[in-house]
Image: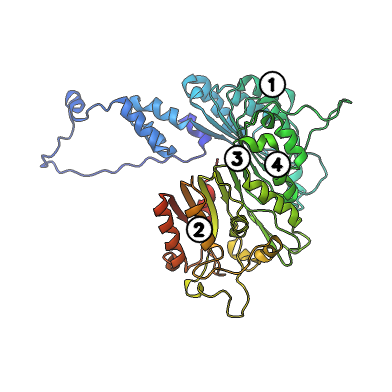
Amino acid sequence: MGFFDYFDQEHLVSFDLAVVSKSSTLLPARLPPSAASRALPHLPLELVLLIFQHANDKYTYLSSSLVCRAWSLPAQQFLFNHVSLSSQSACLSFIDTISASPALASSVQTLSASIDHNQPFGLSQLSFAHAFAQCPNITDLRISLYGCAQRGTGKDIVGIPDVARMRRLAPSWDQETLELLRVGGQGQVKKLRFSNWSENRTSLNQLLEVFEELDELVIVGTSPEVPTSSSASGTPLPPSISLSSLRINIHSRTHPSPDYLSWLLHTSSTTSSLRSITFDRVPPAPVLDFVLNDEGISKGLEELRVCGLPPVAPATNAVVIAGNAAVASNAAVSTSNPKAVESILTTLSSLPRLKTLSIEQPASFLRVLLTKSLPPSIEHLAFGLEVEDPSLSDSSTSSRGHARSTSLAVPQGRPRAASHARSSSLSTLPKLGINQGPIAGGPVGMKTLVQTIRNELEDLKSLKVLLVDSDDDVTAGGVGVNDIRKSESKWLASLKMVCAQRGVEVEFERDVRRWRESFQC
């Protein structure tokens, strides 16, 4: 089983042996060949392929490839649909396998590669390029890059001093590698996911010059920068790619600038090809303002997914929760001018073709809801909503007489540590002319939400709600231990009722991780 080596799995085969007495007449000890063929009817290959198609499990494919000769090749072809390479030995084994079996090389549709220059036997750029060039049908390419761009930095991407890990460099792609990628690609790569955990900010730009037929782009980790030109002509020409989907998962403090997005999306804006934009973390106000106000982008935009809206200054004792990071203190929080956020909300309400809107943070969704910034063309709406104790829902104030505040969505990883640092993020809403207090009979804005679904969103087809507990007893799933008891509260029943009357499909999710996974590209 040499071609299984690069899957980095241990394959164990076990047998269950049952002892049958000689006096047993259920089955003979051994059937003649003709009798055996009659006892095991032939299963049509079409049904086998249909089973494999719905299995979507590599362990099933591994076991099926060992059943019989007729199943071996089809199971291996499904097994090779998604290949992951993370070491030099795995890559060489993979190249040997597909060289001996071109059918397996043609079966590869998704190729994931981890290029870590800090590992002694890590995958090299050239070996990865050779493996890629031998697979003619790859449509989804996922690259993770580790290392640093220059020697002597002494810090990794998250700022932890670690000189030992930074011995090896993360150089830019050399010309031989780029040529192999260009020749091997031949326009079939439609989706590129580039996770850059190095300090090299130019690697992505090199790949964009190679894969000119990209349709979807996912950028994770280190923020890229606008390439510099060696000539006197100024900034190099933007890439010729016309994207339909862009996803960015980069911290707001190091987020790509509007200048870089303008350079990256120049062709997409010209052709109005961009249909979907996703920000996994809270984007800076200038970035979100650029995306929504660009005429070419806004004209074709149909899907917008954001973790939350930029926080509004001043944000006293505020917490910005983005992805796995919870950043406290005024110095670390990147706040925005209220007028900038108000401009974003105004532009959001006027997007002509927006059909899908997803906002994870409850405070941000309430800001959109209470300012009536939901476009009437919305068909699919997903948002985070705070769960409150129904026994207190009829009161507009807490026991101390203060208005309730809406918390942010619990981040992935260490949710309990971040739960004590929740912010009163609705304290900025009065600056936008929004009533801060809750509405009797449910959480803040529930009455407005029900009325909006009933009277304004005529094209609405589905709702997906992330329930966020307002208490401090937050579990790893992003939900308090008492949430199950609150699921049938009055406000939740009202929302279900109005959705049933309108024929709107509604789905509730209590696990923030599962919520995010449902939007993964």
Q: Which residue lies furthest to the right in this view?
A: 232
Indicate the amino acid at tag 2. Answer: Gln
- As drawn, is 43 to the left or to the right of 298? left
Q: Name the residue carrying label 1.
A: 179
Q: Which residue is drawn at 50% across and 46% down?
A: 380
- Closer to the chain start, of discs 4 and 2, is 4
Circle 2 residue = 451
Q: Residue 204 carries which label?
A: none
Percent x, y of residue 428: 70, 63
| Pointer 3 residue | 352
* Residue count near mark 4 (Cα–Cα under 10 Å), binned few <14, some 14–19, many ≥20: some
Mark 4 residue element: helix
Distance in Å between CA atoms under marks 1 and 4: 37 Å
Q: Earlier in the sequence, mark 1 or mark 3?
A: 1
Q: Which amino acid does label 3 sit on?
A: Pro
User: Of the residues shown, which amino acid type is indicated by label 4?
Assistant: Asn
Q: Where is residue 291 in the image (x, y as percent from the top left)?
A: 69, 41
2 or 3: tag closer to the N-terminus: 3
What label does residue 293 carry, if any? 4
Q: Are marks 2 and 3 in contact (CB under 8 Å)?
A: no
Q: Which of marks 1 and 4 is nearer the N terminus?
A: 1
